[in-house]
Image: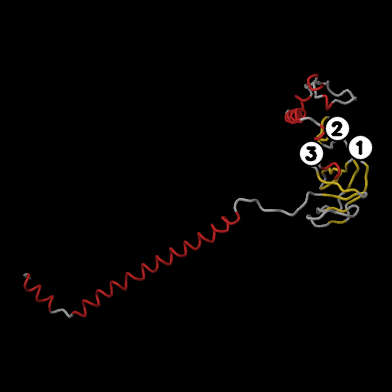
């Protein structure tokens, strides 16, 4: 077929077929762009939903209204202390007081005798020196009298000391001493003067004494 015959054949085509073909291609392309546009809009919406609350809240930790575990015994309020002791072989120094009989919300202070703000109803309570010990699930936990709660205690050779009564150097020494194995603790023969007692435990550190 030469160029003249091809041109004549093309001229004989009805223009409506050409229009339909062009419109058909246009209609096929339009839904594809709409589809991608909707997907992009959904993605933006998801990003906004996730990101905006974080920006508004910042990096602040959640605020809890819970108080530290407390018990009220014999008209005194006691609070769980972070400085827990090893009560092995010390049960002979305990005086049995009774059992926890009721509880209040963890956001409240107990106000009645043998009441706690923790779920420990039935736990046995013992007097230990100026503090109390609570037997929970077979383990003893120390609670300090609230008047002394701010003066957190530390233990050395089975005796309690208020941190506020000790110097920074002594506290650092205690941290080191408690970090070494028991067999190495036995080899330590010099202790800070603030920890020296009349029972002959250890030897006074001359530098600390000064």
Secondary structure of the residue carrying numbered label 3: loop
Residue at the far top in the pictured view: 206
| Mark seen at residue 159 | 2
Disc 2 packing (10 Å; few <14; some 14–19; many ≥20): few
Residue 86 visible, this angle? yes
Dot 3 or dot 1: first in sequence order is: 3
The numbered dot on residue 83 is 3
Which of marks 2 and 1 precedes in the sequence? 1
Left-right relation of 30 to 1: right
* CA gap, disc 3 and disc 1: 19 Å
Residues at discs 3 and 1 in contact (Cβ within 8 Å): no
Q: Given contact means CB atoms under 8 Å apart, are the residues at marks 2 and 3 in contact?
A: no
Q: Earlier in the sequence, mark 2 or mark 3?
A: 3
Work out how far the residue at label 2 is from the one at label 3, CA to CA, in angstroms: 12 Å
Foreground: disc 3 or disc 1: 3
Looking at the picture, how far across and down is residue 8, in whole percent?
9, 76
Q: Is residue 181 visible to us here?
A: no
* Dot 3 alpha-carbon crowd within 10 angstroms: few under 14, some 14 to 19, many 20 or more: some
- Residue, disc 1: 93
């Amino acid at each position: 077929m030469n160029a003249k015959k091809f041109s004549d054949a093309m001229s004989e085509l009805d223009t409506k077929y050409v229009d339909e073909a062009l419109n058909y291609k246009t209609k096929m392309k339009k839904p594809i762009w709409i589809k991608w546009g909707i997907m992009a809009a959904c993605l933006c919406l998801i990003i906004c939903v996730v990101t905006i609350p974080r920006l508004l809240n910042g990096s602040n930790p959640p605020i809890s209204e819970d108080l530290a575990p407390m018990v009220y015994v014999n008209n005194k309020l006691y609070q769980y202390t972070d400085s827990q002791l090893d009560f092995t072989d010390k049960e002979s120094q305990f005086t049995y007081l009774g059992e926890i009989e009721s509880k209040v919300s963890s956001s409240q202070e107990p106000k009645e005798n043998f009441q706690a703000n923790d779920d420990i109803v039935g736990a046995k309570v013992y007097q230990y020196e100026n503090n109390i010990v609570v037997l929970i699930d077979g383990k003893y936990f120390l609670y300090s009298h609230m008047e002394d709660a701010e003066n957190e205690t530390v233990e050395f050779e089975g005796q309690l000391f208020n941190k506020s009564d000790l110097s920074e150097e002594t506290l650092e020494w205690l941290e080191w001493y408690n970090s070494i194995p028991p067999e190495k603790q036995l080899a330590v023969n010099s202790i800070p003067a603030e920890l020296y007692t009349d029972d002959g435990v250890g030897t006074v550190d001359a530098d600390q004494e000064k």
